[in-house]
Image (spheres, rainbow, N blue to C red):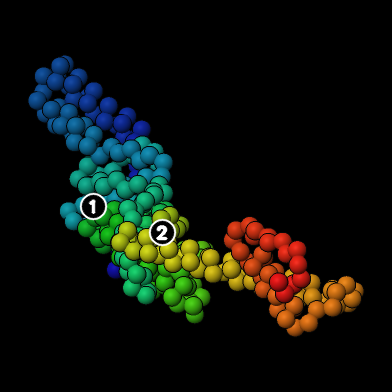
């Protein structure tokens, strides 16, 4: 398979001077010598003018002669090439692909919406021009395919798959590196270099978003309650130990149970406790 070849073009300014001389000689020959043969000089100058091309910074010109690839002009400037060359300009600048959120299924089967930002540029002009039909469309389609494949390989989170070490939501740099690797492999055929790829949108699909939000809220509440109960038990244990060590009051098992019950209600309740004053004994 052919590779990109650098083409050394002639300076356009030198050939512009040559064309000017041909054109001037033809006109003067017709005027002063009255010889029609000088029309050929004018025609030659006009034909040569078709070979001028301007290559801007971070741009290239792929040259083809009768279906044969002749090379690529990678330097920027004003050049002259064979007028019969077909010149195809290809930009070498970095470009962004901000994909629209796609609806896909994660590893567990949950429908999610995911979108990525891809930074890419053309690295091999021969592959971009001849190995694919339209390299820009190729980047768009292969990026979508890579997103779908990656999303199906990992769960959205580890709520349902607790053994998952990498998830789409918390994977961060690891997920980005895996996405870049897959995109690099897919786009190599078109001579495309992947500079960066990151997830810029991630959410559950609308049909399950409400249920998943309630599940996340319930998980957060359970985790918070666990911490509250754990702290309350420690505080009750500390209170009983302090009362016993300092011999402030002698509590039997029933009194301890009542005290523990009251303290747990006060410490674990999500509302302020309303005290009830007992003016009699503890058993009234």
Quarter placement of the C terminus = bottom right
Residue farthest to the bottom, as pictured:
253
Q: Residues within 10 Å of mark 2 (few under 14, many from 20)?
A: some
Q: What residue sits right under mark 2 in the picture? A: 202
Residue 197 vertical position relative to residue 151 in the rendered view, above or below: above
Residue found at x 32% / y 53%: 100
Q: What residue sits right under mark 1 in the picture? A: 64
x%, y% of residue 65?
21, 52
Left or right: residue 260 compared with residue 6: right
Residue found at x 39% / y 59%: 203
Residue 119 vertical position relative to residue 176 in the rendered view, above or below: above
Q: Residues within 10 Å of mark 1 (few under 14, many from 20)?
A: some
x%, y% of residue 34?
11, 19
**Badge 2 element:** strand
Residue found at x 26% / y 47%: 88
Q: For the residues carrying marks 2 and 1, which lies nearer the camera in this image?
A: 2
């Amino acid at each position: 398979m052919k590779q990109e070849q650098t083409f050394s073009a002639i300076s356009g300014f030198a050939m512009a001077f040559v064309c000017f001389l041909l054109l001037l000689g033809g006109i003067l020959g017709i005027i002063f010598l009255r010889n029609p043969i000088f029309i050929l000089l004018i025609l030659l100058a006009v034909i040569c003018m078709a070979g001028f091309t301007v290559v801007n910074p971070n741009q290239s010109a792929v040259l083809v002669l009768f279906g044969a690839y002749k090379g690529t002009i990678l330097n920027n400037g004003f050049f002259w090439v064979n007028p019969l060359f077909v010149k195809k300009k290809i930009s070498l600048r970095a470009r962004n692909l901000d994909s629209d959120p796609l609806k896909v299924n994660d590893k567990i089967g949950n429908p999610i919406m995911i979108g990525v930002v891809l930074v890419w540029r053309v690295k091999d002009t021969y592959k971009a021009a001849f190995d694919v039909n339209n390299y820009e469309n190729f980047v768009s389609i292969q990026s979508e395919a890579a997103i779908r494949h990656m999303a199906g390989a990992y769960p959205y989170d580890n709520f349902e798959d607790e053994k998952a070490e990498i998830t789409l939501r918390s994977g961060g740099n690891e997920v980005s590196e895996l996405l870049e690797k897959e995109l690099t492999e897919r786009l190599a055929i078109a001579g495309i270099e992947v500079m960066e790829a990151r997830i810029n949108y991630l959410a559950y699909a609308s049909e399950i978003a409400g249920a998943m939000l309630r599940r996340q809220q319930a998980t957060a509440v359970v985790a918070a309650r666990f911490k509250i109960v754990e702290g309350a038990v420690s505080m009750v244990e500390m209170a009983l130990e302090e009362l016993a060590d300092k011999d402030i009051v002698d509590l039997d098992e029933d009194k301890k149970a009542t005290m523990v019950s009251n303290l747990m209600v006060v410490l674990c309740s999500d509302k302020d406790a309303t005290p009830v004053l007992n003016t009699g004994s503890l058993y009234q």
